[in-house]
Image (cartoon, rainbow, N blue to C red):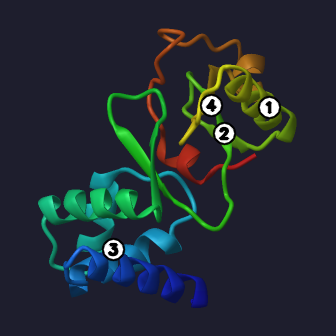
Amino acid sequence: MPRIDSAVGRFRTFLDEHELKLTSEREALVREIFATHYHFEADELLFKMKQKSVKISRATVYRTLELLVKSGLVRRVHLGEDHYHYEHVSGNSHHDHLICTACGTVIEFHDEAIEQRQREICERKKFTPTFHNLQILGLCDSCRRKGEQPDAPDRVKMIGQGAMNLRK
């Protein structure tokens, strides 16, 4: 709970700096987001809030997510589908993604050698990076063993409910 309270406090500070209010709906969203430990969709978040009897509109969810992204507390991630997913940011939590285009499984990883190589390339090109997002689309081991083939190599069929909770 202290981590969630810290996130609420950081969001309150961000909102104060922009002369905005921390409404009860916004606070409830932050608490739900930081209690969620997988990539989620905005509409999924709306559904969860309604299940908990929090009166909140779709517009409030989307506007609050945008504020959370601007504050650096939430990251918007494109996982090969036609919409974004979101994940909360905790400390130095940078990671990249392997995405199975057959079943939608998302495998998070961090590789310091890749990170170092990217820094070297930026330095050599005199480029100042502000953000990067590495995604590798392909087949997970389970789908590969089953002989699965994706419909299109650059599109994820769907991020299934089971895949949302699956982390390797």
Residue at the image position 48 percent from the left and 40 percent from the top? 160
Characterize the local packing of mark 2: few (<14), some (14-19) or many (20 or more) Cα atoms within 10 angstroms. Answer: some
Q: Which callout, 1 or 3, points to the residue nearer the camera?
A: 1
- Given residues 155 and 114, the one toward you in this image is 114
Q: Distance between the residues labelled 4 and 2?
A: 5 Å
Tell me the element at label 4: loop
Residue 69 position by quadrant = bottom left
Q: Which callout, 1 or 2, points to the residue nearer the camera?
A: 1
Quadrant where the N terminus lies? bottom right
Q: Which of marks 1 and 2 is nearer the N terminus?
A: 2
For residue 96, which numbered disc appears in the image?
2
Give coordinates of residue 168: x percent, y percent.
76, 46
Residue at the image position 15 percent from the left and 59 percent from the top? 58
The relative height of residue 41 versus residue 149 in the rendered view (above or below) is below
Give coordinates of residue 59: x percent, y percent.
13, 59
For residue 114, which numbered disc appears in the image?
1
Residue at which label 3 appears: 29
Q: What residue type is labelled 3?
A: Leu
Tell me the element at label 3: helix
Residue at the image position 55 percent from the left and 13 percent from the top? 150
Residue 102 position by quadrant = top right
Residue at which label 4 appears: 134
Q: Which of marks 4 and 2 is nearer the N terminus?
A: 2
- The reply to whether the C-beta atoms of the residues labelled 4 and 2 are less than 8 Å apart is yes
Q: Which amino acid does label 1 sit on?
A: Ile
Characterize the local packing of mark 3: few (<14), some (14-19) or many (20 or more) Cα atoms within 10 angstroms. Answer: many
Residue at the image position 12 percent from the left and 66 percent from the top? 57
The relative height of residue 23 versus residue 150 in the rendered view (above or below) is below
Q: Which of marks 4 and 3 is nearer the N terminus?
A: 3
Give coordinates of residue 167: x percent, y percent.
69, 49
Q: Which of marks 3 and 2 is nearer the N terminus?
A: 3
